[in-house]
Image (spheres, rainbow, N blue to C red):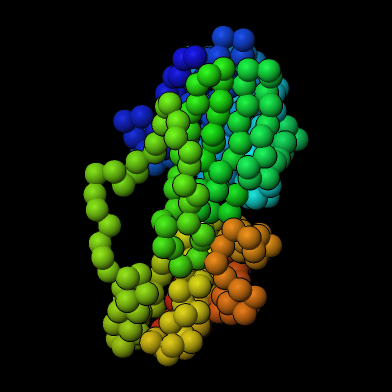
């Protein structure tokens, strides 16, 4: 058994782990490089393995740095199964076509403004590519043992990061491996704690925050201080937040702060169509988070949902102060 690190090594994005088991090749995660241009350019470089030679992909979770290379992998010849949890599939149904749309928009923008070295500039992949690879998805619940062949099996263990997130526990012959994916915190207010994994021979552990220590400050206290300080001077609080995971946590925090009257009853806008969709998915997976029906209803009603660019522009027409939670695309616009 050999493992190759094709991403998330020397950086914290583009997670791809290639397992060569002799009789088959398996990819754990198939993420897109994001961030600095030097990293994004890596998405255009060919991998050291032909996609057609990979029999299956196993996803830890839906975030684009773990799943967003899949449409290009499929476009370049991959035709195997993509295994994931039910929650990961539901989120990928939203995230991957959106990623394809952004790739097409970037190419169109480059062509309109003539800044690409390539004429015409092409999209890394398209919405169509994303929709086609979604047809390859096969979903399983947590703890279900999936038998790939008579020597290899795997199962998903709850990771507490976002809906559907998992650690991948893999057995091959007499050896065991665990791929952590992204792990949630044990005492998070929203998501349930990651499940303690069994002992393994090999552990592949992601360490985005491996070189720092989280502060002891409570997020509710920090958020209340920023909102109150900004509101007192008549300003608006604009919060950039991941559409999947962070946006839902922020909605819940704002609900708690308003319930406790620790902040003024300011209008709140969730300015991200993707975050709106992700929030609706979040509400369906009661077994993966800590919120009861009353808290979910309160979280959902704390914000005004923005679904179009026109409505997004109209936020400016309202009075200050206000709170705007926005994912990257909308906040840049």
Give coordinates of residue 32: x percent, y percent: 49, 35
On screen, residue 104 versus residue 176, left or right, reads: right
Give coordinates of residue 129: x percent, y percent: 68, 33
Q: Residue furthest top?
A: 22
Q: Is residue 333 visible?
A: no
Q: Residue at x 48, y 33 (%)?
A: 178
Q: Residue at x 44, y 53 (%)?
A: 184
- Foreground pick, 69 / 107: 69
Q: Residue at x 50, y 49 (%)?
A: 195
Give the quarter of the image for residue 35.
Answer: top left
On screen, residue 34 versus residue 11, left or right, reads: right
Give coordinates of residue 40: x percent, y percent: 42, 34
Give the quarter of the image for residue 276.
Answer: bottom right
On screen, residue 47 versus residue 96, left or right, reads: left
Q: Is residue 35 visible?
A: yes
- Foreground pick, 143 / 304: 143
Give coordinates of residue 265: x percent, y percent: 47, 88
Q: Is the residue 158 above or below the residue 285 in the image?
A: above
Q: Residue at x 24, y 53 (%)?
A: 213
On screen, residue 207 versus residue 93, left or right, reads: left
Marks counted in the figure total 0
Q: Is the residue 262 above or below the residue 226 in the image?
A: below
């Amino acid at each position: 058994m050999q493992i190759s690190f094709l991403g998330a090594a020397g950086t914290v994005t583009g997670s791809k782990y290639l397992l060569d088991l002799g009789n088959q090749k398996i990819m754990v995660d198939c993420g897109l490089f994001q961030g600095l241009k030097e990293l994004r350019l890596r998405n255009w470089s060919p991998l050291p393995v032909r996609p057609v030679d990979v029999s299956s992909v196993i996803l830890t979770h839906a975030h684009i740095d773990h799943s967003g290379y899949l449409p290009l992998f499929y476009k370049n010849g991959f035709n195997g199964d993509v295994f994931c949890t039910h929650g990961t599939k539901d989120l990928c149904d939203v995230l991957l076509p959106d990623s394809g749309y952004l790739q097409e928009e970037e190419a169109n923008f480059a062509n309109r403004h003539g800044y690409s070295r390539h004429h015409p500039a092409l999209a890394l992949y398209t919405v169509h590519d994303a929709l086609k690879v979604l047809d390859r998805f096969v979903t399983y619940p947590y703890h279900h043992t999936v038998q790939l062949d008579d020597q290899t099996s795997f199962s998903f263990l709850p990771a507490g990061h976002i809906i559907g997130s998992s650690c991948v526990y893999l057995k091959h012959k007499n050896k065991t491996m665990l791929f952590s994916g992204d792990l949630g915190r044990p005492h998070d207010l929203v998501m349930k704690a990651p499940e303690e994994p069994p002992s393994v021979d090999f552990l592949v552990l992601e360490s985005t925050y491996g070189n720092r220590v989280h502060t002891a400050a409570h997020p509710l206290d920090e958020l209340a201080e920023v909102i109150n300080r900004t509101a007192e001077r008549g300003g608006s609080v604009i919060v950039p937040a991941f559409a999947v995971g962070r946006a839902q946590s922020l909605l819940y925090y704002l609900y708690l702060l308003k319930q406790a009257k620790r902040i003024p009853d300011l209008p709140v806008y969730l300015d991200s169509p993707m975050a709106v969709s992700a929030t609706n998915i979040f509400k369906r997976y009661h077994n993966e988070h800590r919120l009861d029906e009353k808290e979910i209803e309160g979280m959902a009603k704390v914000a005004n949902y923005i679904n179009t660019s026109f409505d997004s522009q109209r936020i400016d027409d309202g009075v200050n102060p206000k709170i705007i939670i926005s994912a990257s695309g909308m906040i840049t616009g």
